[in-house]
Amino acid sequence: MVDNNDSFIREVNEELRSDQFRNAWKRYGRVVIAVAVLIVFGTAGYRGYEYWHEGQSSSAGDKFLAALTLANEGKADEAKAALAALEKDGYGAYSVLARMRSATVEAEKGDPAAAIKAFTEVGKDNSVPAVIRDLARMRAAWLLIDHGTYEQVSAEVEAMATPRDAMRHAAREALGLAAYKAGDMAKAREWFEQIAEDAETPRNVASRARMMLDNITASGKAS
């Protein structure tokens, strides 16, 4: 008798659950279907975007490597044209990388003024990642050592010559060399001493700084 009662109770519970499910489906079935559809399409869209993103990056990377090959082969004009196309239509970071390499091609062609202008423009472009802007300013500064003034070099990199800046060593060296070239030995000595006294200065940079300090001392013009 007990077993029959238990069986009856189970059947009633199952029926109740079935009724509850049917009622719930009537009320929320469309919502469940809509959510399921969104999940399916969302997943498909994400996978599609990933595939598109990878394809675009791969294509831009191939074009960039082809442009580098042209530049390395001395085909400056062809390299410039390929890089210009990437500057305009390049995907992701390849557009700004093309701008940087295009400026380098100008320098290799023997047109430092065009190269400096291009690097300076990248350095002032706030849409470019900060680290790339800093690199562009540094490249401009090193060209300006031979093709500009101390003031121009300073305008590009003196802000990076601070104690905590990752690029301070290169910035200080550029400033020291620019001051030395300008005949300002006192200022040159200040920059090279900062390099020599910084415990984190790379060994080769510190060695060059000490050599320049010896030259300045020998010149007798740093008093």
Image (tube, rainbow, N blue to C red):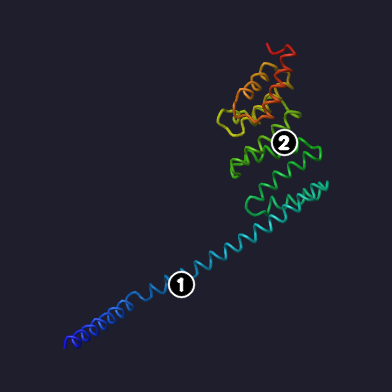
Give the label on residue 61, or none: none
Q: Are marks 2 and 1 in contact (CB under 8 Å)?
A: no
* Residue placed furthest toward the left: 1
* Residue placed furthest toward the right: 74
Q: Circle 1 sits in a helix, a strand or a loop, which is it?
A: helix
- Determine whether 49 is above or below 152 in the image: below
* Quadrant of residue 192 within the rendered picture: top right
Label 1 packing within 10 angstroms: few (<14), some (14-19), many (20+)? few
Nearer the observer, 217 or 48: 217
Horizontal relation, residue 177 to residue 10: left or right: right
Residue 72 visible from this viewpoint: yes
Residue at 69 percent across and 22 percent down: it is 210
Residue at 65 percent across and 59 percent down: it is 56
* Quadrant of residue 202 within the rendered picture: top right
- Determine whether 210 is above or below 35 in the image: above
Residue 208 position in % (x across, y down): 71, 26
For marks 2 and 1, the one nearer the N-term is: 1
The span from disc 2 to disc 1 (Cα, nearest Å) is 54 Å
Amino acid of disc 2: Ile
- Determine whether 206 is above or below 63 in the image: above
Residue 152 visible from this viewpoint: no
Q: Circle 2 sits in a helix, a strand or a loop, which is it?
A: helix
Q: Which residue is mark 2?
A: 116
The tally of labels here is 2
Q: Which residue is mark 1?
A: 37
Residue 58 position in % (x across, y down): 67, 58
Which quadrant does the N terminus fall into?
bottom left
Which quadrant does the C terminus fall into?
top right
Amino acid of disc 1: Val
Residue 121 position in % (x across, y down): 66, 39
Label 2 packing within 10 angstroms: few (<14), some (14-19), many (20+)? many
